[in-house]
Image (cartoon, rainbow, N blue to C red):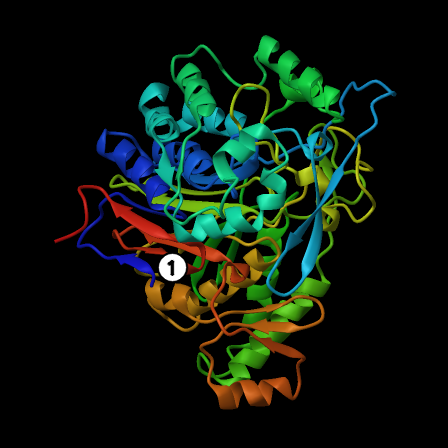
Amino acid sequence: MAEVVAVDGPRGVVAGGHRRTVEAAVQVLEAGGNAFDAAVAAGFAAAVAEPCLSSLAGGGFLLADPVDDDPLVYDFFVDTPGRGATADLDPALVPVTIRFPGADQIFHVGAASVAVPGCLPGYLHVHAARGRLPLAEVVAPARDLARGGVVLGADQAAIVRLLRPIFTRTSASRAMFAPADRPFADDEVVRNPQLAAFLAAIADGQVTGFDDPDLARDLAVANQHDGGVLTVEDLTGYRVVERTPLVVRHAGAEVVTNPVPSFGGALIARALAMIAEEGVAGAAGSLARLEQVARVLAEVTSAHVGVGVHLTEPASPPRPTASKGTTHVSVADAEGNLAAMTTSNGTGSGITLGETGVLANNIMGEADLHPAGFHRSPPGMRVGSMMAPSLVFPASGPAVVLGSGGSERIRSALTQVLIGLLDDHLDLQTAVLAPRMHWDGRVLQVEPGFADPILDALEQRWPTNRWTVRDLYFGGVHAVTTDGAGVGDPRRGGSVGVVGGLPR
């Protein structure tokens, strides 16, 4: 069941992937913080409450729309490591088999799978640029969660159980996620005292980021000792990039989203343009509309090509696409500030960064992200992403803040929600909960909820796989509006919180 909130009048509202993540953001709003304080607080908290999806060592994007300024994207996704590395470093990736219900898949983890972290520098950058509260108040909810413990719940626990082969690789991750005598339980309490201490040091100003010289040296030495290529120069040279967002018009609305060098936003824009050029084909849920959406999703998938970008150069060789373990938070405060933030840690590398308790990403070790081969991309290159935190400003009515996790399915999920909102004039809850499709390049993956006769007809023209359950495969669109409504997508454990508590 989706978590949905609707209130009268503009109040601060947050939608995200875990109740504790959302509560951290609401707590900061109630303390007088703005939407950007709240998004940063949610990011820190997600590193504790959504540990398989986000981490301070992951990467992401925050699309900010301040009431007194133009929208701006803060790009803090990961870089490829190895800047200034000596020639004798030899990346040693470790293959691990993950057993999904329908198939086995090999992931590559370990020290060599770790890309240059972006989330921590991103959160600190956004807070310094846009935040209002002292950093200590913004970090406090996450610190308290890490120290006192958090119940991950059924959705996150299922991912922990799936990734057990990764979490059993080191004593630190085993202690948190891999009980020796039983599977990880839905009501398991996870504590991370090392991360709590690290967060306390950030809150007190003792640590100002992974680029602190002593910390950077320790992390690089440990990573290289274990077979990685992370260097001091990677950590001290990492930069958050501020970008002008991509803005497109569709069905009388303005859609603001993530620009290149990431391409999720551009592909969504292309899909909307194709719908507009063709005209809306039939009513929502009709065969004509489903065929149109399927065709658009397929054409956008076939057009999915990326070009990598150095921070100091206009372009570089082809680069990988987005990672799998991803979450999103949407915030609208009572003043009208809007924040949409999507973050990822891949599937995790199975290791922590030194003594920080921070779970390291494995984004350099996911084969589908590196079609040219592992560690072939030049050091210092932004890894490509499908993430597309977005804002919608319709011709009339409240603005919408939204985004999704789901790797390649991000573009499909957001495109279909936007079509529902703008072309079919659905309310937010109906648009988010409507069944979805995704063209994976070979087969049309279809959620339950479409009428069987229509699917029967669709199958005559498209190779189709009918899912029997709704699943996180199809993304998790967490969205809020400027009039105080919010929807947490149940596909990814969505939750909603409102300043002042739930409405009467």
In which quarter of the view is residue 227 placed?
top right
Q: At numbered mark 1, what does the secondary structure look like: helix, strand or loop?
A: loop
Q: Quadrant of residue 398?
A: bottom left
Q: Position of residue 497 (x, y in %)?
A: 27, 46
Q: Residue at x 39, y 42 (%)?
A: 188
Q: Residues within 10 Å of mark 1 (few under 14, many from 20)?
A: some
Quadrant including the N terminus:
bottom left
Front residue of 145/438: it is 145
Q: Nearer the viewer, residue 389 or 247?
A: 389
From the image, tell me which residue sits under label 1.
394
Camera-nearest residue between 220 and 424? 220
Left or right: 165 as drawn, with respect to 403: right
The answer to which image quadrant residue 462 occupies is bottom right
263 displayed left or right of 284: right
Residue at the spot 58% in from the left edge and 29% down from the top edge: 171
Q: Residue at x 17, y 41 (%)?
A: 500
User: What is the x, y in percent for residue 308?
Assistant: 74, 41
Q: Residue at x 65, y 38 (%)?
A: 362
Residue 406 at what x, y percent from top left?
A: 55, 54
Left/right placement of residue 206 relative to residue 10 reads right
Q: Is residue 390 visible?
A: no
Q: Residue furthest front?
A: 181
Name the spot of residue 386 as percent of width and height, x first.
Answer: 61, 50
Identity of the amino acid at label 1?
A: Pro
Q: How many marks?
A: 1
Task: Examine the rendering and report whether any part of residue 317 can be seen.
Answer: yes
The residue sitting at the left extreme is: 504
Q: Is residue 229 above or below residue 393?
A: above
